[in-house]
Image (spheres, rainbow, N blue to C red):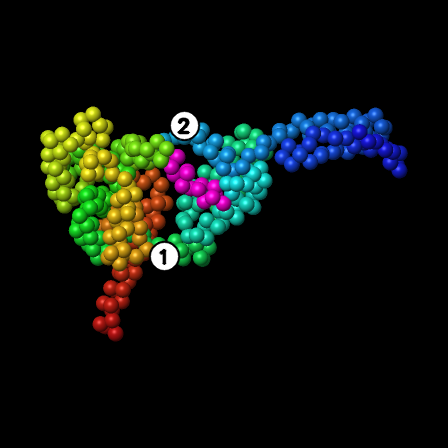
Amino acid sequence: MYCRVLKNGKWSCTTDATPNPLTGQRRQVTRRGDTKKEAVRRAQLAADELSKERQTMKRIVQEVYDEWLNVYKETVKASSVKTRMVAIKPFIDKHGAHLISKLQINDIQKFLVERRDTGISQHHIAGTRTTLNLMFDFAVKNDYVEKNIVKDTVIPKANKKSRLLVNAKKKYLEKDEIQNFLAGVRSSGRRNAYPVALTMLSTGLRIGEVLALTWNDIDLEKRVLVVNKTLFEKGAEEGGFEFAPPKTEDSNRTVSFNEDLAEELKRMKVQYNKEKLIGLRDPKSEFRNLVFAGKYQQPVRAVTIGSVFNTIYRAYGINDVSGTHILRHTHITMLVEAGVDLPVIMERVGHSNINITLEIYTHVTKKMQQQSDDKINEYFRQFI
């Protein structure tokens, strides 16, 4: 400890605390007192307090993410884990090799702004921020960081560029596109492609809900089906499939379907009974009663169906479209155009968040209003 007398007669003492745990740099504290004894006491007390402060451990973001994910997997269903992994992947790609304790609020905020500028929705940005918040909470509890800096960030507002990108994305298929698409999947010769497409367009089910349907869930006479599970494909490490609970509590529902789908399902039921009769359906398998099964009676991968649909979209010039989810949105659009009330639509498609349904509902009703205005204007032209 170094002490000296100041010009005013008081004393100043400087002493060492423990080195910075992250950088290893020397840390000193200086305190003053009316006497040398008081200055020594104050300096030593301050050094002791600084040394007692929680010392964060050196960890890169990738390491913290891996540790957090292993814990998180034990607390939620597998589909929730997959959602979090997808949401945070761009952040891990960018900052995975950085020390997590070195990240600043601005780093997180800048990343969220960058995500917005790629054209993803506010809903997805919020999901990314929530995932980061969970990981940083874990980091605080394990002394990897001193505080959760994600809590001091905000979800960036949509700007003109991001709105243009979001609005440019096709939200549903037009009537002629639906006809072309169904004709395409029907003539594709791909097993399950047409009935899956017809089921999604007729019921608005999510792809995982469709692929999880068993014959016990379907009443062909009453033309209703029960949604009580989803098909989840495990990660590459585990492999295989499993039945998981639906996305939300509201996703458990009963859905009616039309005669066209009923006829298609009846045809498939005949084929299913033949497969059972000749022993193609393993009576010990939990997937033995699947409505949609692969060539060897295994569960169907959602990515395979999505790939087939993408090929059809391109072949028929249906642009700015990919995957399966647009068929669910198209079903919602059909309901809106048919005059079905918003609460009824939400119940039918299993939406617990009104904003998701409302976004499509508003978009379609604006288009319908414009068409109505055009008809009115055309009618009045005959009098002018």
* The residue positioned farthest toward the bottom in the image shown: 384
Magenta residues span 80-94
**Residue 289 pos. (x, y %):** 19, 31
Report, in whole angstroms, how far the alpha carbon at label 1 lies from the one at label 2. Answer: 39 Å
Q: Name the residue type under label 1.
A: Ala
Q: Is residue 266 magenta?
A: no
Quadrant in which the C terminus appears: bottom left
At x 38%, y 37%, the residue is 82
Residue 84 located left or right of residue 363 = right
Mark 2 is surrounded, within 10 Å at the Cα level, by few (under 14), some (14 to 19) or many (20 or more) other residues, namely few
At x 49%, y 37%, the residue is 62
Which marked residue is nearer to the observer: mark 1 or mark 2?
A: 2
**Residue 355 pos. (x, y %):** 36, 45
Residue nearest the viewer, comparing 233 with 115: 233
Residue nearest the viewer, comparing 286 with 31: 286
**Residue 27 pos. (x, y %):** 71, 34
Inspect this view and state whether residue 9 appears: yes
At x 52%, y 38%, the residue is 61
Residue nearest the viewer, comparing 330 with 77: 77
What number is the disc on residue 168?
A: 1
Inspect this view and state whether residue 361 appears: no
Q: Main secondary structure of the magenta part?
A: helix
Quadrant in which the N terminus appears: top right
What number is the disc on residue 74?
A: 2
Q: Name the residue type under label 2.
A: Glu
Q: Earlier in the sequence, mark 1 or mark 2?
A: 2
Q: Secondary structure at mark 1?
A: helix
**Quadrant of res 126:** top left
**Residue 288 pos. (x, y %):** 19, 30
Q: Secondary structure at mark 2?
A: loop
Q: Pointers 1 and 2 in contact (CB under 8 A)?
A: no
